[in-house]
Image (cartoon, grey):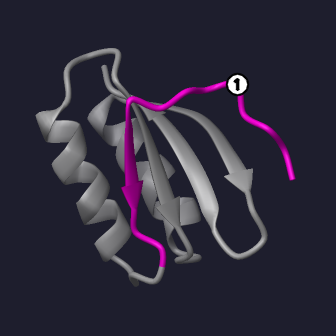
């Protein structure tokens, strides 16, 4: 397990939710956030590994890091 250098401003716990739940939870938080906000999305849904980066690329936000915890991932996003 890797230790992250990012200290999130907001944590979204979507563990246990299935696609598209985690992505929709993230989109809701991104819409509320100011530029520069770091959001940690916690997800156990395998689809998030491709859906989230794809959406971030289209929406113009940055994926800072993905940390594999074994039974879920933490995806760190910076709002632009």
Q: Residue furthest left?
A: 32
Q: Where 1 falls versus 10 (above or below)?
A: below
Label 1 Cα neighbours within 10 Å, binned few <14 / some 14-19 / many ≥20: few
Q: Is residue 3 magenta?
A: yes
Q: Which residues are magenta?
A: 1-15
Q: Main secondary structure of the magenta part?
A: loop
Name the element at disc 1.
loop
Residue 3, position as x, y percentages in the image: 80, 38
Q: Is residue 57 magenta?
A: no
Residue 8, position as x, y percentages in the image: 47, 32
10 left or right, relative to 29: right
Q: Which residue is mark 1?
A: 5
Q: Where 5 falls versus 13 (above or below)?
A: above
Residue 4, position as x, y percentages in the image: 72, 34
Q: Residue furthest top?
A: 36
57 left or right, relative to 64: left
Q: Name the residue located 23 percent from the left edge and 39 percent from the top edge.
A: 30
Total count of labels: 1
Pick the front one: 3 or 45 = 3
Q: Name the residue located 22 percent from the left edge and 45 percent from the top edge.
A: 29
**Quarter in which the C terminus is drawn:** top left
Residue 32, position as x, y percentages in the image: 12, 36
Q: Residue furthest right?
A: 1
Q: Name the residue located 24 percent from the left edge and 63 percent from the top edge.
A: 24
Q: Name the residue located 78 percent from the left edge and 70 percent from the top edge.
A: 70
């Amino acid at each position: 397990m890797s230790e992250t250098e990012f200290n999130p401003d907001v944590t979204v716990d979507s563990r246990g939710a299935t696609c598209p739940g985690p992505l929709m939870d993230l989109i809701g938080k991104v819409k509320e956030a100011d530029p520069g906000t770091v959001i940690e999305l916690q997800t156990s849904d395998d689809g998030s590994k491709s859906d989230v980066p794809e959406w971030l690329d289209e929406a113009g936000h940055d994926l800072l890091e993905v940390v594999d915890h074994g039974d879920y991932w933490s995806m760190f996003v910076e709002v632009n």
